[in-house]
């Protein structure tokens, strides 16, 4: 199976290789595609607006975790 995507003009450039073969053509509705994008954008914006816990990084504790140092000893 071979999948071609593009505008009608781009698909027509494959006329020679498609001549005599059965094809399935799906025409996308530009408005449908736009609404799908809008739905994904709305979902992303909703996710971004969710409250996040305050997770400040404490450098001394991070160094201790990485290097095994005691942050109280300096």
Image (cartoon, rainbow, N blue to C red):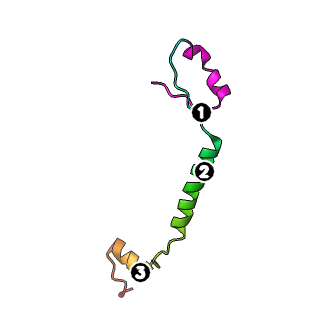
Position of the N terminus, as image quadrant, is top left
Image quadrant in which you'd find residue 6: top right
Classify 56 as above or below 29: below
Q: Is residue 62 magenta?
A: no
Frontmost residue, 71 versus 25: 25
Q: Which range is magenta?
A: 1-19
Q: Is residue 3 magenta?
A: yes
Q: Residue at x 34, y 78 (%)?
A: 69
Classify 3 as above or below 58: above
Dot label at residue 35? 2
- Residue 64 pos. (x, y %): 35, 77
Q: Secondary structure at mark 1?
A: loop
Residue under numbered circle 3: 60
| Nearest-to-viewer mark from 3 and 1 | 1
For the residue carrying disc 2, how many other residues have a C-alpha within 10 Å: few (<14), some (14-19), or many (20+)?
A: few
Farthest right residue in view: 9
- Residue 52 pos. (x, y %): 48, 74
Count up the numbered dots. Answer: 3
Residue under numbered circle 1: 27
Frontmost residue, 8 versus 59: 8
Q: Residue at x 60, y 37 (%)?
A: 28
- Residue 8 pos. (x, y %): 65, 28
């Amino acid at each position: 199976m071979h999948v071609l995507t593009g505008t009608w003009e781009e698909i027509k450039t494959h006329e020679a290789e498609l001549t005599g073969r059965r094809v399935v053509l799906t025409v996308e509705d530009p408005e449908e595609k736009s609404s799908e994008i809008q739905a994904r954008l709305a979902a992303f914006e909703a996710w971004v607006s969710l409250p996040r816990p305050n997770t400040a990084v404490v450098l001394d504790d991070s160094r201790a975790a990485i290097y095994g140092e005691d942050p109280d000893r300096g």
